[in-house]
Image (cartoon, rainbow, N blue to C red):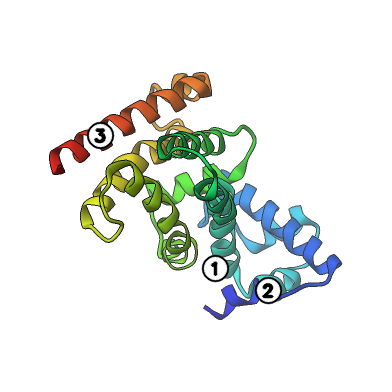
Amino acid sequence: MGAIRKTDRTQRPDGEATYNRILDVAGDLFASAGFAETTNKMIAAKAEVDLASINYHFGSRNGLYQAVLVEAHRRLVSVEGLELLVSAELPAREKLRRLIEMLVESATAEHSWHARVLSREVLSPSSHLQTLQEREIPAKLPFVLAILSDITAIRSDDPALLRCLISVMAPCAMLLVVGRNVFAFAEEIRHMPRRDLVEHLYNFAIGGLEAISRHRS
């Protein structure tokens, strides 16, 4: 955990630039080759830094990979973005639509490593997945649950709302897997208009949420 905390410290502008360069290069390499096949030497060469810089900023290759996972999840959806969405003067259903829109746009973004890194971790989870469960997901979960609670009238502490969360988020998460061309139809889905994907996922989600709400009333 010490290596992770090290990345959170305040840095000078030149140190921050080096940190970000290493992070982006590592993210791109981890996305392309995977964690096991990507060495610190490869990252240092592409980032044009020495090996000591990686250890200085991230503590180890494990620390760097954990930082990459955290950044990837933040690029998929950020706490700041969720906070703005939940506080907006919008109906809960529109908030859900915009949340799905954010996820679709981020998951299907071209030439971006964050979705590919997350897809590798989804398909073949490592022990580093715990980093997201500790650092990113708990801070974001209440915002999404608040939206679902408003739609369904199910209390946020009711286990039924977590089941709703899984049902809504799982199809969106599948877009990460599709981005890896795991399935024969992946390319076709990946090139569908984003508007059509958003509308389908939203209608699918809202239909299920309405059914659950009716069943409980």
User: What secondary structure is found at the residue carrying circle 1?
Assistant: helix
Q: Is residue 36 left or right of residue 47?
A: left
**Percent position of residue 121, x then y:** 44, 51
Q: Determine if residue 51 is in view.
A: yes
Return the residue at label 2: 55
Q: Earlier in the sequence, mark 1 or mark 3?
A: 1
Q: Earlier in the sequence, mark 1 or mark 2?
A: 2
Q: Residue furthest right?
A: 14
* Residue 62, disc: 1
In the rendered structure, are the residues bearing label 1 and label 2 in contact, judged by CB atoms less than 8 Å apart?
no
Instruction: Name the amino acid type tagged 1.
Output: Asn
Q: Residues within 10 Å of mark 2 (few under 14, many from 20)?
A: some
Instruction: Name the amino acid type tagged 2.
Output: Asn
Q: Earlier in the sequence, mark 3 or mark 2?
A: 2
User: What secondary structure is found at the residue carrying circle 3?
Assistant: helix
**Percent position of residue 33, x then y:** 55, 47
Distance from Cα at disc 3 to Cα at disc 2: 51 Å
Q: Is residue 217 left or right of residue 152?
A: left
**Percent position of residue 201, x then y:** 38, 29
